[in-house]
C-alpha cells in the first residue's frame, strides 16, 4: 500500500461578504486576500488547512 501524501491547502474567507475559496498555494490565497481588501476594505482571513 502506498503512503497517502497530503498537500496543504489554504482557506480564504471574507468576514463581510460571501467570498470563500480554497487554494493550493499560499501565495495565491494571499494575493486574492490583498486584492479583495484593497478593493473593498473588508476583513479577510486566510488559514492553512490539512
Image (cartoon, helix red, strand yellow):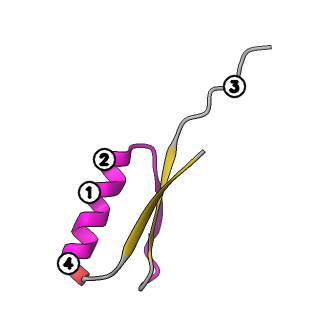
Where residue 19 appears, x then y in whole percent? Answer: 43, 74
Q: From this viewpoint, which residue is outermost toward the top?
A: 1
Q: Magenta span has 25?
A: yes
The number of numbered discs placed on residues in the rendered structure image is 4
Q: Which residue is mark 3?
A: 4
Could you classify mark 2 by the number of other residues whose Cα lies within 10 Å: few (under 14), some (14-19), or many (20 or more)?
few
Mark 4–mark 1 CB contact (< 8 Å): no
On screen, 11 above or below 26?
below
Q: Evaluate if marks 1 and 2 touch, with contact meaning CB atoms under 8 Å apart.
A: yes
> Range of the magenta residues?
17-39
Identify the residue position indicated by label 2 in the image.
27
Quarter of the image where the C terminus is located: top right
Q: Residue at x 31, y 56 (%)?
A: 30
Picture coordinates of residue 14, whole percent (x, y)? 42, 75
Any magenta on residue 13? no
Q: Earlier in the sequence, mark 4 or mark 3?
A: 3
Give the farthest residue toward the left.
38
Amino acid at each position: 500500500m502506498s503512503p497517502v501524501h497530503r498537500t496543504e491547502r489554504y482557506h480564504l474567507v471574507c468576514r463581510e461578504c460571501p467570498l470563500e475559496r480554497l487554494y493550493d498555494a499560499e501565495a495565491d490565497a494571499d494575493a486574492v486576500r490583498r486584492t479583495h481588501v484593497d478593493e473593498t476594505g473588508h476583513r479577510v482571513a486566510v488559514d492553512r488547512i490539512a
